[in-house]
Amino acid sequence: MQEKIKVAHIITRLILGGAQENTLLTVEMLPKIDNYEITLFTGPPFGPEGSLIEEAKKRKIKLILIKSFRRNIHPWLDLKSFFKLYSLLKKGKYHIVHTHSSKAGILGRIAAWLAGTPIIIHTIHGLPFFPYQNKLMNFMAVNLERITALITDQIITVCDNMAKKAHSAKVAPLNKFFTIYSGMELDKFLNVKENKKLKESLGIKEKELVVGKIARLFELKGHRFLLKSAKEIIDKFSNAKFLLVGNGNLKVQLQKQAAELGISDKIIFTGLVPSKKIPDYISIMDIVVHVSLREGLARAIPQALACGKPVVAFNIDGADEVIRDGQNGFLIPPPEIPEEKWKNYDCTQLTSSILKLLQDANLRKKMAKEGRKIVDPIFRAEHMAGEIDNLYKQLLRKKKIVF
């Protein structure tokens, strides 16, 4: 009987999020391609974002929960997590360790290297250093990435621009990076029909047009800019409603902002929505807006394009790799640094882009058609898993590990 290729995937926590959904699909699909035996290591899904632990169990993924794993820096718990990881990786004798997210990427790669793992891979879903973070944190993040890159065989990025930025920061040589777009169950988005019952349940009238955003309610996701723009849009186009899908620690603050702007009746906060229901929510949107300040390549963008929705987004990281400005959406400049300037952010271009789409049904249809062409097949989960499988096989041959 052929020996199995033993792979350990490590991610800090399994919350409702793009990196986590990407990881679950990868771990689920690889054994369908070849003789892989995969274990997923993760920490508790603390926070308001929701959990994917039960989903992992439903998909019969072998899961090991490390209770001390946390997203934020916590020296004692981090040290405890590191030694636990080292022990498990040493005992498991894995051929490949594949890490995701910054904390898991640092601790997991060092633990794997010390445990003698032949192949170490890391996926960067979003760079841990970015313009809107303080200089000390950026300094620490860049240098930790440089150190761990030395013991990493390959670094996967979810867009080309992220690889370029990491290379520019001298994290690693350009040939150590490899782009694999974040896969999803694409047919669920390509084939979705407008869910009229959902629309009705949310209090959206038949003739109202919906501007939607799918993101956790967190600082860098840019909801404050959309709400500011929403006020101007509603003053000029009263038939619009704004649908904010997701939960997070800014919910009360954003609700307060909407109230102060006098637009609470036009803003719908859905709270947590299971990943499997996202296609239904996008189906009732006429436009998707993604004004985040930090992403790799947000899954909401290709998901929206697959559903036939034009997208308005800040031109950051990988957005311009899928949004063709003026063809399937609009790219607009992000706010300036430092944060103090955000309060005075000029929403003119954001507002005008959304209004242009709201006022022109033919333009929305034209952009919808163009958007669908871009996402298939590069955002299919099968395509992503196949690319990762090819990379694994290439590195196994290079290390002369034969099965």
Image (cartoon, rainbow, N blue to C red):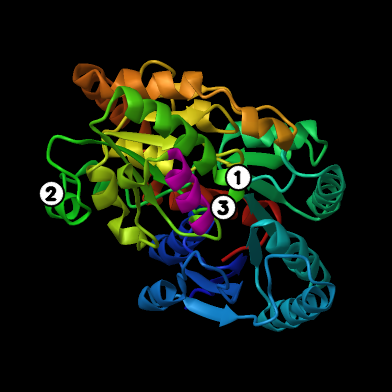
| Quarter containing the C terminus | bottom right
Residue 378 visible to an observer of this rendering: no
Q: Which residues are magenta?
A: 252-261
Neighbour tally class for label 1: few under 14, some 14-19, many 20 plus, Cα within 10 Å: some
Residue 166 visible to an observer of this rendering: yes
Q: What's the amino acid at mark 2?
A: Lys
Q: Residue 150 in the image: state x and y as whole percent.
A: 83, 51
403 vs 321: above or below: below
Instruction: Tell me how far mark 3 sits from mark 2, CA to CA.
Output: 29 Å
Q: Are marks 1 and 3 in contact (CB under 8 Å)?
A: yes
Residue 308 or residue 62, whichever sits in front = 308
Residue 348 or residue 13, whichever sits in front = 348
Q: Is residue 90 left or right of residue 371?
A: right
Residue at image mark 1: 220
Q: Is residue 225 left or right of residue 232?
A: right
Residue at image mark 2: 196
Q: Residue 254 in the image: state x and y as whole percent.
A: 49, 50
Q: Which is nearer the N-term, disc 1 or disc 2?
A: 2
Disc marking residue 218? 3
Neighbour tally class for label 2: few under 14, some 14-19, many 20 plus, Cα within 10 Å: some
Q: What's the amino acid at mark 1?
A: Leu
Q: Are marks 3 and 2 in contact (CB under 8 Å)?
A: no
What is the count of numbered marks?
3
